[in-house]
Amino acid sequence: MAERSEEVKLLGMWASPFSRRVEIALTLKGVPYEFSEQDIANKSPLLLQSNPVHKMIPVLLHNGKPISESLVILEYIDDTWQNNPILPQDPYHRAMARFWARFVDEQIYVTAMKVVGKVGEERDVAVEATRDLLKLLEKELVGKNFLGGERLGFVDIVATLVAFWLMRTEEVVGVKVVPVEMFPEIHRWVENLLDVDVIKKCIPPEDEHLNYIKARMDSLKLKSVQ
């Protein structure tokens, strides 16, 4: 088990859901860390040196040793600082948590990004495809306060991507991907998340975040017509 005095540094970006989930885990564990804001358009030598394979954030530096990819980092944090566990102890439930975390990143996120990148009928198709995936998450939340059960866990931390990125993007895109009448359990879960102090501390400020999302979308639209 690591000591609190050890050096912990996070290379991240304030608006990234992948970076923020690492901050949530570190904060939940009470691990002091240094946050190093990275410019993803002009990557620093430290980032390129620390993650030479993907050259992406987030990267956790623990006593100078780099760990890359947010899901890997979350498990590393849970193994290293064992207080306030975020993964279940039971092997089956741990496997299920990993399954749903990958489902969020590899299915929901990838499909939802098409909502941002498409227009017209193509966007409509992407919205329906995203909703079909979210219906599976909705079913998982029935009878639970959190995806991890009765308290915040691994899948909840990963799925903040849905709560505070996808659902905020709706306001900018002008399309309700997650309407409350279709997804009451997801909306109830988001309210539960907002009751957790660690979540409130670690999610980006809404107004600033919306401005960033809009500017990012405008930049992508400009590049697509050049």
Image (cartoon, rainbow, N blue to C red):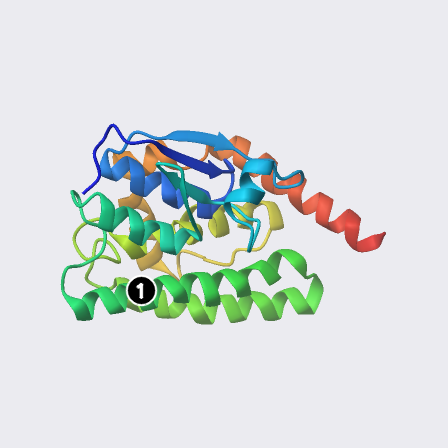
Q: Is residue 7 left or right of residue 124?
A: left
Coordinates of residue 37 in the picture (x, y in percent) = 52, 32
Look at mark 1 in the image and give the residue it sits on: 98
Q: How many marks?
A: 1
Q: Nearer the viewer, residue 98 or 205?
A: 98
Please report the residue visible at 28 percent of the width from the left and 54 percent of the height from the top. Answer: 154
Which quadrant of the view contains residue 111?
bottom right
Secondary structure state at the residue bearing disc 1 = helix
Give the vertical position of 15 relative to 189 (above or below): above
Q: Is residue 97 left or right of residue 55?
A: left
Q: Is residue 180 left or right of residue 149?
A: right
Coordinates of residue 98 in the picture (x, y in percent) = 31, 64
Q: Nearer the viewer, residue 43 or 105?
A: 43
Q: Local crowd at mark 1 within 10 Å, few (<14), some, or many (≥20)? A: some
Coordinates of residue 30 in the picture (x, y in percent) = 23, 33
Please report the residue visible at 30 percent of the width from the left and 44 percent of the height from the top. Answer: 193
Query: Which amino acid is tagged 1?
Result: Arg
Quadrant where the N terminus is found in the figure: top left
Which quadrant of the view contains residue 141?
bottom left
Please report the residue visible at 49 percent of the width from the left and 52 percent of the height from the top. Answer: 166
Coordinates of residue 107 in the picture (x, y in percent) = 47, 67
Q: Nearer the viewer, residue 60 or 13?
A: 60
Please report the residue visible at 45 percent of the width from the left and 48 percent of the height from the top. Answer: 18
